[in-house]
Amino acid sequence: MRSLLFVPGDSPRKLEKGLMSGADILLIDLEDSVALPAKEEARRVTSEFLREQQAKTGRPRLFVRVNGLTTGLIDADLDGVMGAGPDGIVLPKTVGGADVAHLGAKLAVREAEFGLEDGATRILAIAPRTPPASSRWAPSPARATG
């Protein structure tokens, strides 16, 4: 994987242009580049695009960046796109391994529901620029030096 290109999931024109970019992976965005009122339409557009591209050879891998686990939007995102079989899901604002495991469980359920191979959907986790204070490393009292 040499190059990744973020493309808004609510623009068929931009998705088509993304295919011509030469990127190894298109990261179809349902998160930051899509306004809240447009999220449902973005899920529909993204799903249609994934279905159209699924059997094509020579295409980039197609990952979908969903809304984070704490937004209340991730389940609708996954329900909207997993039936189209994305190559992977991008999880933004990942705090730690528990977030990845949580997404993995959600994907396992949807892979079963949509008849996809178990574990076929890759996960790309993105950590926030500045992790929340609760996730920062701090030495345990037994390991603290003093």
Image (spheres, rainbow, N blue to C red):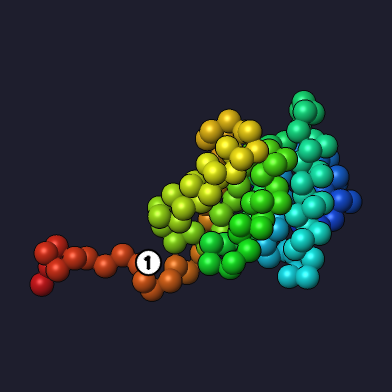
The vertical placement of 142 against 63, above or below, is below
Extreme-front residue of the structure: 113
Q: Quadrant of the N terminus?
A: top right
- Residue 66 in picture, x, y percent from top left: 63, 56
- Residue 39 in picture, x, y percent from top left: 75, 63
Extreme-right residue of the structure: 13
- How many marks are shown on the rendered structure? 1
Question: Which residue appears at 66% of the width and 44% of the height?
Answer: 82
> Is 32 positioned to the left or the right of 93 in the image?
right
Question: Can residue 21 be seen in the rendering of this structure?
Answer: no
The vertical placement of 89 against 22, above or below, is below
Specify the amino acid type for callout 1.
Ser
User: Badge 1, how many Cα within 10 Å: few under 14, some, many 20+?
Assistant: few
Choose between 32 and 113: the one closer to the eye.
113
Choose between 53 and 140: the one closer to the eye.
53
The vertical placement of 7 against 116, above or below, is below
Q: Secondary structure at mark 1?
A: helix
Q: Which residue is mark 1?
A: 135
Question: Which residue appears at 63% of the width and 33% of the height?
Answer: 115
